[in-house]
Amino acid sequence: MKNQKEFELTLVIPAFNEEKSLPEVLTIFMNACKDNNWKAIIVNDGSTDNTKSILSEYGSYGFFSIINHKVNRGYGSALKSGIMAAETEFVITIDADGQHRVGDVSRLIDFIKTNNADMVVGKREYDRNHYRTIGKKAIRFFARMLMNVPVEDLNSGMKIYRTELVKKYLKHCPDGMAFSDIITLLFIYNRHLVLETPIELNKRKHGKSTISYRTALNTFYEILNIILFFNPIRIFLPSGLFFILIGIAWGIPIALANKGVSVGASLSISVGILIIFFGLLAEQISQIRKQL
């Protein structure tokens, strides 16, 4: 076995109540780690089934590490724990439900090195009528309203990163399912090279997805929150200008008709000016927070 410094890639796999999927998934990915000199970190996120005992059976592998959360802390929190423990140049996140294919791991590591990228997103293909496709497009549409987004599958669970970079942004990421979207937007906002390449998914054999409409709503909130943190003027300025223009459009006809100054128009313009003022204030606070 090669020493620690010669490992190039770490697989981070969060697991929560995946006792039925884990034996098959671990067998496949552990063999791949052995053949390719990869490391693997499995994060048991407070599972209440036999996940912990199943993982303990693989503890003898030198390239395999287990992190156990005492309670369920969330998908994003599990990924944070695994990524922070990674010491290789690259780290890739993989779901424990058996949907991701080991062949795509090799493709992604080759792709990120060939293109000298900082993050590569494994782009999934869904049926056009699938509810996840609708949600994915809605989230991307919302994100593109706030910033330029060059990738389509923001919330793909299979992503490969340069470890040193991704660790810098973990503190800004949520502990829930929105982690996948937010980490991608953080890389894009900070002008790192983010690319995507297609991957194939296996059908889930056991259990069912925990993603719901609440997950989508929380993701919208987290995207808005991260934009307010990094670039609040992007939200406040258009909103303020909107109220100012409404006020002007409302007030001009009344003024031209010699009916005085419209109270409603004046209020709208004042609200617009206040919104822009608060946007500038938020921008200053944002700059200070980013330096902390």
Image (cartoon, grey):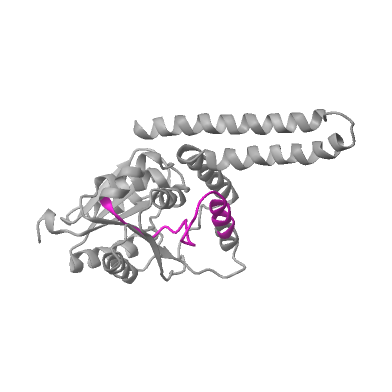
Left or right: where does residue 48 sit relative to residue 221?
A: left
Q: Nearer the viewer, residue 144 or 269?
A: 269
Q: Quadrant of residue 100?
A: bottom left
| Res 28 quadrant in image | bottom left
Q: Position of residue 142 (x, y in %)?
A: 58, 52
Q: Is residue 127 left or right of residue 231?
A: right
The answer to whether any part of residue 170 appears in the image is yes
Q: Residue at x 81, y 28 (%)?
A: 263
Direction from residue 224 to residue 101 in the image, left or right:
left
Going 58% across and 38% down the picture, which residue do you hit?
Answer: 236
**Residue 234 sits in which quadrant?**
top right
Residue visible at 24% across and 54% down in the picture: 57
Q: Any magenta on residue 151?
A: yes
Position of the C terminus, as image quadrant, is top left
Image coordinates for residue 108, horizontal then vertical, percent: 32, 66
Q: Position of residue 240 (x, y in %)?
A: 64, 37
The reply to whether the magenta stretch includes residue 254 is: no
The residues colored magenta run: 137-163
